[in-house]
Image: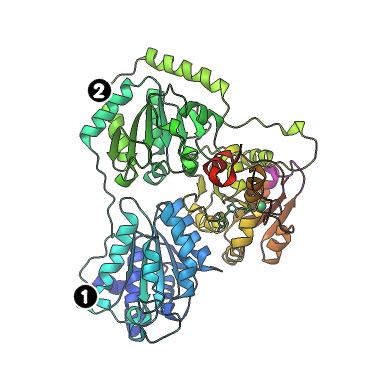
Amino acid sequence: MSAELLSFQSKEDIESGYQYGDLLIHYLEKEGVKYVFGIPGGALEPVYNALARSEVRGGIESILTKHEQGAAFMADGYARVSGGLGVCCATTGPGASNLFSGITTSYADSIPVLALTAQIPVRNFGKNAFQDSSHEGVDMVEVFKKSTRYSGLVLNSRIADDMFRKAIRVAMSGNRGPVHISLPSDVMAELVDEPTLSHSMTSCYVQPHYFDRRAVAEAVKLLSQARKPAMLVGSGAIWSGAAGKLKELAEMLTIPTATTPKAKGTFPEDHDLALGCFGFGGSPRADAYLLDRGVDLLLAVGTSFNEWATHGWNDLLGQGRTIIQIDIDPYQFGRHYESTLALTGDATTVLNEMYDELNRTHRVTRLEHNVRGERYAEFRSKYPISIPYNNALIQDGLIKPQQLMVDIRKAVPDDSIFFIDIGNNLAWALHYLPAIRPGTFFAALGFSCMGYGVAGSIGGKLAAKERPVIAIVGDGGFLMNGMELATAVNYNIAVIWIVLNDSGLGMVRHGQRMSKNAMETSHAFKQVDFASLAESLGAVGVRIDKQGELDQKLMQKLIALKKPVVIDVLIDPDEVPPIGSRLSALKDIYDTD
Ligand SMILES: Cc1ncc(C[n+]2csc(CCOP(=O)(O)OP(=O)(O)O)c2C)c(N)n1
Ligand SMILES: [Mg+2]
């Protein structure tokens, strides 16, 4: 065994031997993993033993969650905020199946999460052992195959070393995403036999930085000739860290820029050139500009043109204009709109090259700059970034979600990180809560699983450290994963949850109401007192039932507590949310006007 491996072992480790579980955890330490989220079970004990040994030597901390779905969401939230690998673990059988929706959430949004699930000992495969998750039982490797970039069974110790590194490499390389490995307990408890270790403990992956020189030159030519260009920025730009370069490029050529809902904030929404969010819940300014027939070039960066980001694939977005699309994953080109020019590569790398090439070949004259700027300023003054809302005109005394979003934005620092759930809460936040810094607004829209924002925010807060993390969630979503509040209390993870309490599944309610042929059903439930619930779990609970109570003074006080807090806000359940584009995408079902 190499000296480096031995140096990580304590005296007790040496006595008990260095197992394959230790090797796995050792690789995670080398990748900078700080937390593993999960719940133990018999077959997972060798992994937990190795985790315990890691914790003793100051390595990885295990975060014990209340449900495996919460563990997967937390690993995902951690990965989104840190930009690194999130890790979760679960035992064989039901532990593994409970992870599933969480891992699928990461898959749909290309988030690098490693799911470790236990497996019964190999010698017991096919003997009707309880929780058999091998190919002889309920095959968890197969279950995870469709929702991961890689799912494999570590059938014996001879392939373990390669599989551990492969899983990490696949999760973190190219278009990132979740991976799953199934770990039989006997294999993980086996002692590592020196000759099997063939690799050094350097990082398992390298992120490529390539670009296509000819395509970059062509893109620059098209851009410099465009008379009315626009830019649409997707979440790929966040993972690539491209926000700074995007802004420079937009400013250099005066390109009005929108983001997709998932990428909200990647282009600061208080910038002169900001169109706001295009798509679901998005901004009237983005709609007016991006759907204008006069736009002759659309530069799309790191977006798959998914349903949320296109108003259900509005044809006008792709018609009569040149589309330049940049994506790390060639599969995303031409899925709905034909791209005139497709550039495969990491967004930052490609944009850097475009920027440099522009500087080399094209000098933007002050006149050109001013003409574009003036035309755009005129347009900008006509179209607001959100539908105007004046609470002062409303006399019914109920808390309006529109105003609540505006109040939240004013009450917390600009660098606060928001996790949003699914439902009307998402539409309100997308529309009325501007994000002004990149990487401050996270919603898991690809799979749109209720409860994500509730638990994902806990992982996010561990990565965000001192920065405030605020989860904006519905009452329905909180009832799905809210027990993870007890996890946050256990480790004192200071997330602030703002629950939009409308005694029901608001999006379902309004969807049914807006439809001509749906009956109102199964959306209402008795009001829950979330402040008391929070207190009973050991968190701080605050109830708000008057407009204006949530202000800067209150939020400063709650942030300074550095404790988990639930703010239960009784909102007006009848306010109609900006969810029209979702309903029109469902027109076959809802038949809305
Ligand atoms: C796990 C899951 N189940 C069901 C849905 C369908 N769905 C989308 S939004 C929604 C209602 C959400 O209610 P709530 O969390 O209270 O948020 P509100 O719309 O009231 O803001 C439902 C049922 C979903 N997206 N995810
Ligand atoms: Mg609700």
Residue 252 in view: yes
User: How is the model colour-coded?
Assistant: rainbow
Q: Position of residue 507 (x, y in %)?
A: 62, 48
Q: Position of residue 543 (x, y in %)?
A: 74, 53
Q: Quadrant of the C terminus?
A: top right
> Which residue is located at x 46 percent, y 56 percent?
105
Q: Amino acid at mark 1?
A: Thr
Image quadrant where residue 200 sits: bottom left
Q: Is residue 298 left or right of residue 274?
A: left
Q: Which mark is residue 196?
A: 1
Mark 1 to mark 2 CA distance (whole Å) = 55 Å
Q: Quadrant of the N terminus?
A: bottom left
Vertical position of residue 470 compared to residue 340: above or below: below
The residue range painted magenta reads 545-554
Vertical position of residue 475 compared to residue 44: above or below: above
Q: Secondary structure at mark 2?
A: helix
Q: Residues within 10 Å of mark 1 (few under 14, many from 20)?
A: some
Q: Is residue 310 left or right of residue 433?
A: left
Residue 547, magenta (yes or no) = yes
Q: Is residue 288 left or right of residue 254?
A: right
Question: Viewer-proximal residue, 203 or 139?
Answer: 139
- Label located before the other in sequence (1 or 2): 1
Question: Viewer-proximal residue, 375 or 354?
Answer: 375
Image quadrant where residue 434 sits: top right
Q: Which mark is residue 361?
A: 2
> Which residue is located at x 34 percent, y 78 percent?
188
Q: Quadrant of ligand 1?
A: bottom right
> Which residue is located at x 67 percent, y 65 percent?
538
Q: Amino acid at mark 2?
A: Thr
